[in-house]
Each structure stands twice: as C-alpha cells, then as structure tokens.
Image (cartoon, coloured by chain):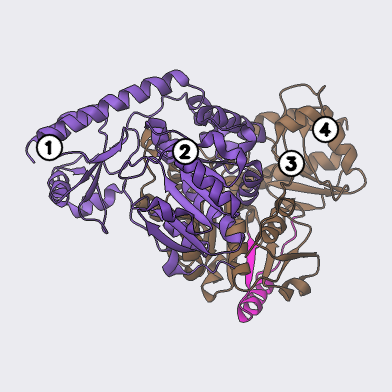
Chain colours: A purple, B brown
Amino acid sequence: MPVIRPEVGDPIQHGGDLAQARASFPDAPEPWIDLSTGINPHSYPHSPIPGNALARLPEPYLAERLKILAARAYGAPSAMHVAAGPGTQILLPVIAGLAAGWGGGKAVVLSPTYAEHARAARLAGLEVTETEDMERLADGRLAIIVNPNNPTGRIVQRGDLLTLAAVMRAKRGLLVVDEAFMDVSEAESVAGAVDAGGLVVLRSFGKFYGMAGLRLGFAISHPETVVKVENRLGPWAVSGPALHIAGEALADADWQKAMRERLKADAARLDAVLAEAGISVAGGTSLFRFIRGTRAQAIFHRLGERAIITRRFAERPEDLRIGLPAAEDWPRVEQALRTI
Amino acid sequence: MPVIRPEVGDPIQHGGDLAQARASFPDAPEPWIDLSTGINPHSYPHSPIPGNALARLPEPYLAERLKILAARAYGAPSAMHVAAGPGTQILLPVIAGLAAGWGGGKAVVLSPTYAEHARAARLAGLEVTETEDMERLADGRLAIIVNPNNPTGRIVQRGDLLTLAAVMRAKRGLLVVDEAFMDVSEAESVAGAVDAGGLVVLRSFGKFYGMAGLRLGFAISHPETVVKVENRLGPWAVSGPALHIAGEALADADWQKAMRERLKADAARLDAVLAEAGISVAGGTSLFRFIRGTRAQAIFHRLGERAIITRRFAERPEDLRIGLPAAEDWPRVEQALRTI
C-alpha cells in the first residue's frame, strides 16, 4: 500500500504567486507584471459561460464531446484514448499510482524538470531517481519525461520516446510524456502512438489557451489505462465552465494557428530585448524563455524591484524562467530590461 | 497496493443526465424539468467571474481564504482542519485510500445510500459491506455514513456518530460522515468534532448553493489527515471560478438563512402536491423528497412522459427521489402530479 507521509508529499513552491512576490519586494511599484509562469497571456476569447454550466451537474454528453475534441486537437487515436480531469496536476498521483499498483519499485525522471512529477511518484510509494541521462530512464517501473521540457526547453526526439515506450511496455512499466507545452513547440507529440500501450501522454489546457484558472488537463493513453484513470476520478471530473470554454477553444483551429504565430513572435521579441540587455537565452518554448548563468539571481532581483516577477529555482540558483508579457506590459518589461 | 480493476470501479448511473432522459422518453414535450438531483434550483446570485479567475493560476492566498470561510460556514475548528477539492466526488477515493493505506481490510457503508462511497472504497482495495445496522459499522477500517442520508433522509444522531468515531479512532480506522445535505437538515453536524481524530466530514458546495457545475467539495478532518489529502490533490486543486463564487457564497450568512427557509417552504409545497396525488413522502431533506412504494416506477414513468425526470434506483425499484422545481417550473410539476 502506498503510505502517504506528509514529509514525502510536502508542497513545492511554484510560479504565479503574486502575494509572495509582493512580500519579497514590498517597495516594488504596483501593479505587478507576472512573468513567473509559462501561461499564455493572450487568453482564449470564449463566449460567456452560461448559467447552467455553473448551476447544473456537468452533463455526461458534454464530457464525451470534450474527449472527442481533445482527441482531434491533440492527435490521439480516438476519444476512448482520452481521460479529462480538473487539471493535469491532479492526474499525476493517479497515474503514478497505476505504475505503483503493478508492483511498486522505482520511478526515473528526466531532470531537471517540473518538480511535481517526482513528488507524485513518491506519494504513490515509488522510489524516485532524477537523472539527466536518457539511458537510465528505463531503470524503473515508471519513466517520466517532460517534452518539451519545463524549464529548459530540451526536446526529446519522437523516435527515442517510442523506443523507450516499447521497453517500458515490455517490462509492464509505464512511460509518462508530459506534453504541457507541446502546443507551442517544434517537438513532435507521441499522442498518436498510445494505442500500443505502456505510454501516457499528458496535455494541459490552461497554458496554451491562457486559462490556467479553469483547471483542465488530459491523460492520453491506451483505453484500458484511460478507464482506470476515469474510474479513479469518478463522475463530473471536469467542471461546467471548463466544458464550455474548452468546447469552443479545442475546436478553434484558426485561433490555435494564429496564436502559435503570435507567441513565436512574442518569444522572438523577448529574446531580442534580453539580448540588448546582454542576457542570452539558453532555451525554452514560445511560452517561456530559459536563462542559465551567474546573473540569474541578479536579474530576478532587479526585475522584482521593478514589480516584474520571474521564476527562479531554489535548488538551481543559476536557472531563471521568464514568461511572456501581456500586450500592455511590454513597455515596462522592455524599460526594466534596458536598465538592468 | 490497491490494484485498480476496471470491473471494480465501473461507472455508476446518476441523476442529472438530461440526454438520457430524452432517450428514455423520446415523445416527451421539451423543455425538460430536471428533478433527478438534489441540487438547489435557486443558484447563489454571485457577482461576475473576473477574467483573471479564469486566466491565471488560482493564487494560494485565495485557496487559504476559502478554507477560512469554509471552516466558519461548516463549523470546523479551524482552516487547518479543512481540505478543499474539485468536488467531493474526487475526494472519496483519496480518503478511502488513506484508510486502505493503514492496512487494507474492510469498509462498511450504512445503506442504502449514495453509491459512490462503496465504489471508492473498492477502488482503494477495501472489501465493502453494505448494512442497515449501525452496530456493524465499526467492523472495518473504514466506516461510511451519509448524514442526512441520500436518498432516504435518515438522520443519525450526533452522539452515535461521535461514539462510532471514538471506536474507529481507537482501532486506527476512519469514520467518514458525508454531510452533503447537512446545510438544509435538522441533523447535527460533527464537523466541530474532527480534532479528536478518526473522523472525516465531507461537505459539498454545489448542492445547497445550486452550483454543482463548479465542482467544489471539502474534507474536514484532523490537520494530519487534511495535509495528506492536500498533498494528494497537489497545488491549484480548486478552480478560479470556484474560489470566486464560494468566496462570496460561504460568507453570505443572510442568503444562507433565507435560502434554508425558502427550501423548507418549497419542500412543504412539494409534499402537499404529492399528498393531493395520493403519494406519501417517506423521507428526504429540504433539497429532495423520498418516496418508497409500489407506485414508484409508475410515478417515474408518468412524470417522464410529461418531460419531468426524477431519480429512480435500478437496484431498489420501490424507491424514488424527487428534487425541488425551479420557481417557473411549479405549474407544470403541479399539473403533472394532479393528473398522474
């Protein structure tokens, strides 16, 4: 049994906490600009949420429709290969629990990466190894790769992922590929390959569509695994507002295409401003830029004093992640970086 | 390890599925009136959901504030005794998993009741016994009582619950008291007694506030248990819309008081109409009325033909649950019952 110990699952610090930013920089001039997340500042222009979407229990046919739309948008083989939940976050311990249920043992995480994966695996009773070496990923029951990676932007090739998935499948293990930032990446999704088994692909709705408050995420996998995840979540796992907004956004290929172009231009603009300030970008995606170097802490503090919060990492002081500004925030960001 | 078998966790049928109602009664005249749930038809009149509540990650200070408000509204000892999640439903296997983690074994459910409790306990690897005998509740690791009960309305006295909680605590087990309909009941909550340990109280936001699409539920327990539940849910478990609306509704004691009176009057009105039709009410709460008898199936069908859906139970053909109509739906409901 997975014994859940408080010390194992203790909360991890994340971006997006403006109250904490205010506490760290009490003299910074309001309003704050939040560049501490990788969430699209250009939110999807949805129609108003109908009253029934809030008042009534989410209807099963809408949840089914969401799965059809998600399968199309993400390239899953079918709606039967898609489980939807209230945020990808809450799916992580459920999926780690599936791997642990097959006999416990070890989880290997390609690192450095989003810290919640290791936490979720530990909660499920797995022993976690973090490694930068792809060769070691198959050492456990559960292999976890974020692709493209957050925060570095590192891309693992589709062929390598499928080879690893086959190895994990052969040993009755599981490869989790977290494609939270795939919507804006040059990397290739493996969502279309889940039917062979041994593979779970995670997709996050909130980041690309700029709707992180909605809490909506997907696990794409073999239908047998999908059923297990769905049974664990139970009925009405996705809220009415999420069903309404994602029902529009996932079907809107025109917006998706235009947004990819816009974010690419935004990222190039940010890179240019950073370059002018003598800061070179080491990686990232079109939703965040990644900086690595001895100036990281100084940049974090200088921007913080100007009420611009970025994301640093307690355990890696040379790393810094910078999100994209909203349209109206560019002048202040450019000004701040010019005088850094 | 809890092995999750599809056949164990297979979905259960619930109320609130209008598409299914339409399929069952294809000739019924639209629009449908949904009396198949126990959700308040008078939704809380919240202010508009701000764009940031959808776009941004829910801020930790808002989640903390929600816990403070919930502790006050539900009578929990403090905010530290409250975990909030995206619907009570998703908390059930998490809590059953805690009990199973302490050594597996048996769960005993006071029945008949909301079927998801037994399903969640089985998912967590527990062997489930359903009983009508309070004396047998302490036979397992996990005891589950819905109070007031759904659908019968049966009330268990506070003293009996606290005695049972003490027994469960002494054997390092857990008593779960699901108070989903406590807001409108004459029953007494045990939320104030969780600090002694061995007890988890569940509260559902969506039912009393008429906001079931929002997905928001609470587990009230000893802080050690709360931490375990929260670690399992991870960060951002409650959506921005839920934080916004519950932040208003839980603090609105005037609305709560007036709504309790209104629902009591509504329930009395429904009882009177049912009595005129020769149908006697066997129990329930102010959010639903419970009928038991040989006419249950006939009433279900007659109302269905008139596009009024109620809740029947496959395994108990003499049981029927009828929710409260919205203000504008009374004439049709009264007319339908008069000619039943």
- Please identify, in this view, whether the residue under mark 4 or under mark 2 is nearer the observer: 2
Residue B112: % across, % down: 79, 57
Marks 4 and 2, how far apart in space?
A: 58 Å
Per the image, the residue denoted by label 1 is A337
Marks 2 and 3, how far apart in space?
A: 67 Å
Q: Marks 1 and 3: same chain? A: no
Is B105 on the left or on the right of A258, as rendered? right
The secondary element bearing badge 1 is classed as helix
Q: Marks 2 and 3: same chain? A: no
What residue span does the magenta drawing correspond to? B153-178
Marks 1 and 3, how far apart in space?
A: 67 Å
Q: Which of A304 and A165 is in front in this view?
A: A165
Quadrant location of residue B144? Answer: bottom right
Marks 4 and 3, how far apart in space?
A: 18 Å
Residue B282: % across, % down: 82, 52
Task: Tell me, yes or no, whether the two marked residues, 4 and 3, touch with CB atoms within 8 Å.
Answer: no
Per the image, the residue denoted by label 2 is A159
Per the image, the residue denoted by label 4 is B303
Which residue is found at the position 36% from the left and 40% from the top?
A155
Kind of residue indicated by mark 3? Arg
Task: Tell me, yes or no, whether the two marked residues, 1 and 4, touch with CB atoms within 8 Å.
Answer: no
Badge 2: few (under 14), some or many (20 or more) residues near its Cα, within 10 Å? Answer: few
- Please identify, in this view, whether the residue under mark 1 or under mark 4 is nearer the observer: 1
Kind of residue indicated by mark 1? Leu
Earlier in the chain: of badge 4 and badge 3, it is: 3
Marks 1 and 4, how far apart in space?
A: 68 Å
Which residue is found at the position 23% from the left and 28% from the top?
A268
The disc numbered 3 marks a residue on which chain?
B
Task: Tell me, yes or no, whether the two marked residues, 4 and 2, touch with CB atoms within 8 Å.
Answer: no
- Please identify, in this view, whether the residue under mark 4 or under mark 3 is nearer the observer: 4
Task: Tell me, yes or no, whether the two marked residues, 2 and 3, touch with CB atoms within 8 Å.
Answer: no
Earlier in the chain: of badge 1 and badge 2, it is: 2
